[in-house]
Amino acid sequence: MVKVVICGDCGSKTLTRAVVGACSAYGGAVVIDGDRIYQTCEEPKYLIFVMCTLADLYLPGSIVVFGKALMQIQKNINLNDTICVLDSDNSDAVAIIGASGARAIGCSMSGPDTLSISGFTDENTALVSLRRSIKTAGGIVEPHDFIVRTDKGLPVYPILAASAVLLSGGTVNEGKGITF
């Protein structure tokens, strides 16, 4: 089971909805979100924890997705054996990951990031660029472009973060588009 921890997505939870939607579409998920626990299919591939506060983390091999509300996330949290997904414009997330030495997948419209959007064909379809190889549960995914289709017009970072989770979890790979 692929373990995903979403940290600091409080309020509208757009990031959580995108990641849960993507994981539900590609293998299903058990979601633990505050006072809610639910399952999206009979035999889910993903286990998703949604945390607004987090003092300690020991889930080797997990994928940690950072939202914007990181005030209650411990700054010296142990992330060494995780893959971290972040908006590279989020200075709090950059500081937390930088202090830990964890592997990071930067997601934004900026040039040096691992995942970026090259363009939109409409509000529900984006062309995403994987700019460098990433290690996954099943091997390595090489740089390539792929189409992401969503049900609703999502902001850039949730689209990229959900794509990074699917790629890192070994669920989708080169040559495949993503729909969630």
Image (spheres, rainbow, N blue to C red):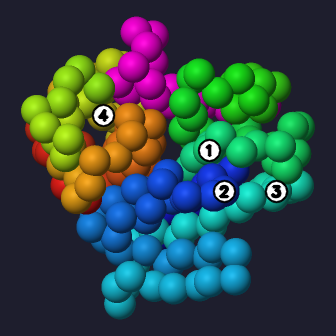
Residue 126 x/y as whole percent: 20, 35
The reply to whether the C-beta atoms of the residues labelled 2 and 1 are less than 8 Å apart is yes
Whole-Å distance between the Cαs marked 4 and 2? 31 Å
**Residue 67 circle label:** 1
Q: Which residues are magenta?
A: 100-116
Report the residue at 45% width, 18% height from top.
Answer: 113
Whole-Å distance between the Cαs marked 3 and 2? 13 Å
Query: Of the residues tagged 4 and 2, which is closer to the observer?
Result: 2
Q: Mark 4 or mark 3, which has the lower sequence index?
A: 3
Looking at the image, can residue 137 be seen? Answer: no
Q: Nearer the viewer, residue 91 or 145?
A: 91
Residue 56 x/y as whole percent: 86, 55
Query: Of the residues tagged 3 and 2, which is closer to the observer?
Result: 2
Q: Quarter-wise, where is residue 93 in the image?
A: top right
Label 2 sits on residue:
10
Label 3 sits on residue:
54
Report the residue at 57% width, 34% height from top.
Answer: 86
Report the residue at 76% width, 43% height from top.
Answer: 70
Looking at the image, can residue 108 be seen? Answer: yes
Which amino acid, mark 3?
Leu
Residue 62 x/y as whole percent: 59, 54
**Residue 141 circle label:** 4
Residue 71 shown left or right of residue 152 in the figure: right
Report the residue at 74% width, 58% height from top.
Answer: 52
Crowding at label 2, few (<14), some or many (≥20) Cα neighbours within 10 Å? some
Q: Is residue 109 magenta?
A: yes
- Compared to residue 15, the image places residue 141 above or below, namely above
